[in-house]
């Protein structure tokens, strides 16, 4: 009960007062372990998830067994397959914990009932939808016409708070690269930064 109270208090601080008051009664706290799956590809996604602590991803697997991470979310962010969640269609994605996570979950059925009683909740949901679709758009733009190194550098600048917490395979699948390419780019950037640092030290002397 104490953990639940702390999670709800944290969520309230991260959310506008109106939004929190509208949904606080339908939030369900849950803890999940690293690599635990919340929603499976081929089934309906029935959860809208707020990550209090941890990191999660939404990914698909192609015919050759390769994973493609479409969306990443960490502390204070939302994650879901909105198309499946809102339409009852089966999802083409799996939602998986990349780290041990503390979550607040809203089920589709509870949300539908709450929307009937509180139509104003739709504005709050639109804000969440814009946040997630905005991330999708930025990701797509970063992939168009960008080299492998440019993709990694853009990701590093955009997600400095999470890049060190993610497995290299997850980063590679998000950037549309193979893990070996990501490793090569990381080593190259580390070498270049080391050279620059040494030059600055010489200048300072």
Image (spheres, rainbow, N blue to C red):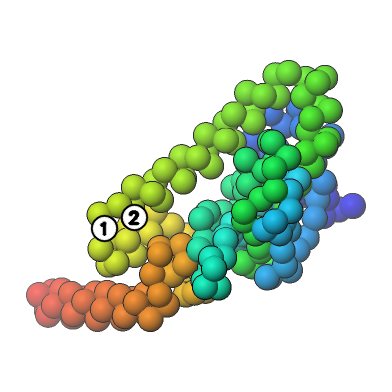
Q: Nearer the viewer, residue 196 or 77?
A: 77
Residue, far right: 1
**Disc sitting over residue 146 in the figure:** 1
Q: Which of 172 and 92 is in front in this view?
A: 92
Residue 51 appears in view: yes
Asked which secondary structure carries label 2, the reply is: helix
**Disc sitting over residue 143 in the figure:** 2
Residue at point 41% right, 50% down?
A: 139
Q: Determine the image quadrant of residue 125.
A: top right
User: Which x, y percent locates residue 69?
Assistant: 52, 61
On screen, 104 above or below 31? above
User: Which x, y percent locates residue 11?
Assistant: 70, 42
Residue 74 appears in view: no
On screen, 143 above or below 9? below
Q: Determine the image quadrant of residue 15.
A: top right
Residue at point 52% right, 73% down?
A: 64
On screen, 203 above or below 146? below
> Is residue 195 found left or right of 157 in the rendered image?
left
**Disc sitting over residue 5 in the figure:** none
Asked which secondary structure carries label 1, the reply is: loop
Tell me whether circle 2 and circle 1 mark residues in contact (CB < 8 Å): yes
Residue at point 42% right, 43% down?
A: 137
User: Which x, y percent locates residue 159?
Assistant: 43, 57
């Amino acid at each position: 009960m104490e953990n639940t109270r702390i999670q709800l208090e944290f969520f309230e601080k991260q959310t506008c007062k109106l939004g929190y008051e509208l949904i606080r009664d339908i939030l369900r706290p849950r803890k999940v372990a690293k690599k635990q799956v919340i929603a499976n590809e081929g089934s309906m996604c029935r959860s809208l998830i707020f990550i209090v602590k941890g990191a999660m991803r939404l990914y698909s697997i192609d015919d050759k067994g390769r994973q493609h991470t479409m969306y990443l979310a960490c502390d204070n962010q939302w994650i879901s397959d909105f198309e499946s969640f809102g339409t009852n269609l089966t999802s083409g994605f799996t939602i998986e914990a990349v780290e041990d996570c503390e979550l607040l979950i809203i089920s589709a059925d509870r949300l539908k009932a709450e929307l009937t009683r509180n139509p104003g909740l739709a504005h709050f949901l639109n804000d969440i939808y814009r946040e997630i679709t905005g991330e999708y758009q930025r990701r797509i733009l970063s992939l168009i016409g960008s080299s492998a190194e440019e993709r990694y550098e853009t990701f590093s600048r955009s997600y400095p708070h999470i890049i060190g917490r993610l497995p290299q395979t997850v980063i590679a699948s998000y950037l549309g690269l193979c893990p070996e390419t990501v490793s090569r780019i990381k080593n190259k950037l580390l070498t270049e930064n080391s050279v620059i640092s040494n030059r600055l030290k010489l200048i300072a002397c």
